[in-house]
Image (tube, rainbow, N blue to C red):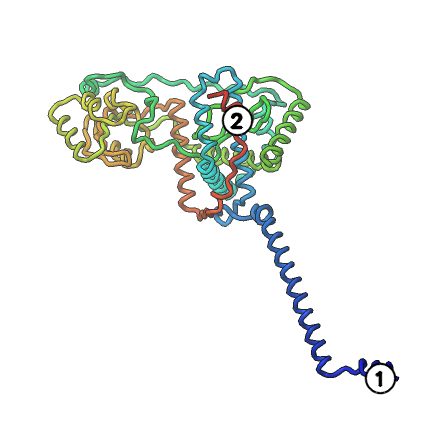
Amino acid sequence: MANEKNESEQKVVTKKHIARQVKEQRQRKIVLISVISILVVVILLITYGALSKTVLLAGKTVAKVNNEKITVEQFQKRVRYERQTLTQTYTSYYSSGFAQFLQSYMLQIQNQLDNYISFGSTVLDNMVAERLIVQKAQELGFTVSEEEIDIEIQENFGYYPNGTPTVEPTVEYRPTSTLSAEQLALVTTPTSMPTDRPTATPEGVTSTPDLTLVPTEAAATATEVIPTNTPAVEVTATPIPPTATAYTKEGYDNLYATVIANLDTVTKFGEADFRDYVRNIIYSQKLYEYVTKDIADEQDMVWARHILVATEDEAKTAIDRLNSGEDFAVVAAELSSDTSNNTLGGDLGWIYQGQMVPEFDAAIWAMEIGEISQPVKTSFGYHIIQVLGHEIRQLSAEELTSANSTVYQTYINNLKTEATIEKNDVWASVVPSEPTIPTEIRTAAQ
C-alpha cells in the first residue's frame, strides 16, 4: 500500500513543474542555437579569410581604364612575367662569358628587381597605356587575328615557315649643306656642321617616351622572344641577340611548348596570357604605323646652341657677357650646367619640331639666325639660346625614329589626358617580389 501511494505521488506533476521544464528546454534551445550561430560565423570568417587571399583578392580591381578593369590577378601575372624576363636576361649576361663588360646592365637589372614596388608601378603604368592603345586601335577599326599572333610569335622565335624575309635596303643619307659665311662668323670655334644630334641627351630635349609596350624576352631556354617592329623606346636592358638557326615546324612547336610550360610554372602567365600580350603588341604596332604614317623624312629644322643656368639672374649675366663680345663657346664652357654639350660650345645640333621641351621649342622657331634669346625658362632651368641655322633637312634614320617616337608618345599622352583612369591603392600591397635573381648567381656576379 505504501509503494502504491508513493508511485501515485510521483506521477503528480504540478503546473509549476511544467513551467520550469518548458523554461529549461527553451534555455537549452537558445544556447544550442547560439553555439551553432557562433560556429557558422567562425566558419564563414575562416572561409572568407582564405578566399580573400585567393579568389576574392584576385578579382579585385587595381586600375580602371575607361571602365575596363585591370584585376589583381592580371597585374600579378604580368609583374611576374616581366620579372622573369629580366631575371633570364641577367642570367644570360652572367653565362655569356662577358659578364665583366656587362656589369652596368646587370646592376641596372638588379636594382630594378630589388625595388619591386617601383617595378610594379611601372608595369601597372604600362598596362594602363596598353589598354588605352587597344581601345583606340579598336575604335579606329583595327583588328588582330589569331593568324597574325601566330606569325608574330613564330618570327620572334626565329621560325619562318615561308623563308627568312629579305632585309630592307637602308635609306641613302644625302650630303648636307656647308657652313655659310654668316655661320662661320658666328661659330668662331666650330666643330663642324652637325648632321646628327649629340650622343648624350642635352638638357632641354624632351625625355625619351615611356612606351606602352616594352618588348621583353619570354623564352626560358636559349631563345629569346622579343616582339619586333614595336615602337618601344624605354629599354630596360640590352638583350643578347639569339643565334639564328633554321629548324623545323616540329622543333618550333617543341620549343614553344617548353617556353609556355616554363612560364606557366614560374609565373602563372599561361599561353592565353602570352597570346594576349602579343596581341596588344600588334595593336600597338598598328596604331604606331597609323599615327606616324605621314611623318616626312625631310623636315624644317633649326641648328641651335645654348647655355643652361639655374637662375634668371645668372642667365642675364651670361647675356651681358655675350652682348659685350665674349665668345658663346667660352661662356658655355664656363657657365652651362648641361654637361652633354658645354664643352662643345653648347651645340645642340639640328633640331626638328617637337624634339625639345615646349618652351624651348617655341623659342627657337621664332628666332632669326644669329639671334640670342632672352632667358627661356623650362623645367631644366634658364636657357640662353642662339640659332645658327634654319633649313629643310633630311632626317637621319635615328632622327626619323626619334621623331616618330616623339609624335607617337604625344599621341599616347593625349589619350591618357582624355581618358578616365583610376588606380586603386591596393596595387602596392599585392606587387609580387618574385621571381628574382638566384642568390648564387647574384653573389658570383658581384
Along the line of sight, the residue nearer the viewer: 205 or 266 = 266
Query: Which residue is label 2 attached to?
Result: 439
Q: For marks 2 and 1, give the CA distance.
A: 92 Å
The amino acid on which the numbered mark 2 sits, given as a three-letter code, is Thr
Secondary structure of the residue carrying numbered label 2: helix
Three-letter amino acid code at the position of disc 1: Lys
Label drawn at residue 318: none
How many neighbours does mark 1 have within 10 angstroms: few (below 14), some (14-19), or many (20 or more)? few
Q: Residues within 10 Å of mark 2 (few under 14, many from 20)?
A: few
From the image, state whether disc 2 or disc 1 is nearer to you: 1
Q: In this image, 262 relative to 397: left or right?
A: right
**Residue at 31% from the left image edge and 18% from the top image edge:** 176
Picture coordinates of residue 292, whole percent (x, y): 43, 33
Q: Residue at x 64, y 55 (%)?
A: 43
Q: Residue furthest left?
A: 324
Helix, strand or loop at label 1? It is helix
Q: Position of residue 198 (x, y in %)?
A: 32, 22
